[in-house]
Image (cartoon, helix red, strand yellow):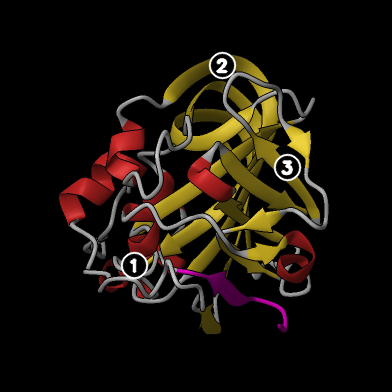
Amino acid sequence: MSKNELYQYSVISALMEGICETGIPVKDALENGDHGLGTVPRMEGEIVIIDGEVYHFPPNKLPQRVELSSILPFVMTTRFKPTFEKIIPSLTMKSLPEVMSPLLPSQQNQFLSIRVYGHFSQITFRVAGGQCKPRERLVELAKRQQVFALEQIEGTLFGFWSPAFSGSFSVPGFHLHFLSKDKKGGGHVLDFDARSATLQAAAVCKYMVELPQSKDFNLAAIKNANSEELKAAEGGNNTSVEASSS
């Protein structure tokens, strides 16, 4: 994949249905990008890819580097080359859409890749606990997820803005994962408050999805993701924005 193109393996609707046993090797994901996010088999934790390094946040353990042979049943990755950059004295999850101007709202119907580095006075993130049985749905896993809140910590957020119409393929709105500078904490971001933050972003010029060919994926019809269940499971934020009046 060329710079600022988005490669995705599988779709969020499959994860919602608990389809996450097989996938692609990390090596193949890195051939398509150097930044991204995803999950591991049975959704036992979260994945973030920053500068070509892949970290796994398992439940009840410190983050760990991932082997190139490890399998990812869902991943979104891009060769990140920012076309937009701002240094911001204060940034929160709530203020992120406004600070993303002019990319939002002018390009709200495109995918955007986003990276934030800064000092976080507060950040809240979750780690999925993993399936207890085959095809256990993501909304059930969310009921027993581990939620962490850290204060006064440096680190990097990376993720994507996905347009509202993409809800069966990805998480509409902002989907961000966090990795602390000391590599000891991270997960799926629920909220944050950053100081002295550097925000970088780029509009995605091409979106390519590879569908699994497994028997499990094709066993039954995968329906459109239920928006309320998706929000409960993934915490999609700010799925639409409006232009400010001048």
Tell me where residue 214 appears, x and y as whole percent: 50, 73
Task: Please state which of the two labelled residues, at mark 1 or mark 3, is closer to the viewer.
Answer: 3
For residue 105, the mark is 1
Q: Residue at x 26, y 46 (%)?
A: 231
Q: Earlier in the sequence, mark 2 or mark 1?
A: 1
> Gap in Å between the C-alphas at discs 1 and 3?
31 Å
- Most distant residue in the top direction: 151
Tell me where residue 39 appears, x and y as whole percent: 56, 49
Q: Earlier in the sequence, mark 1 or mark 3?
A: 3
> Gap in Å between the C-alphas at discs 2 and 1?
31 Å
Give the magenta part as a residue range. Answer: 1-10
Q: Residue at x 55, y 30 (%)?
A: 194
In the image, 17: left or right of 229? Answer: right
> Within 10 angstroms of label 3, few (less than 14), some, or many (20 or more) residues?
many
Query: Pointer 2: what residue?
Result: 150
Q: Is residue 7 above or below residue 216?
A: below
Q: Hey, what amino acid is under mark 1?
A: Pro
Q: Is residue 102 visible?
A: no
In the image, 157: left or right of 70? Answer: left
In the image, 180: left or right of 173? Answer: right
Query: Pointer 3: what residue?
Result: 55
Rendered-image quadrant of the C terminus? bottom left
Q: Hey, what amino acid is under mark 2?
A: Leu
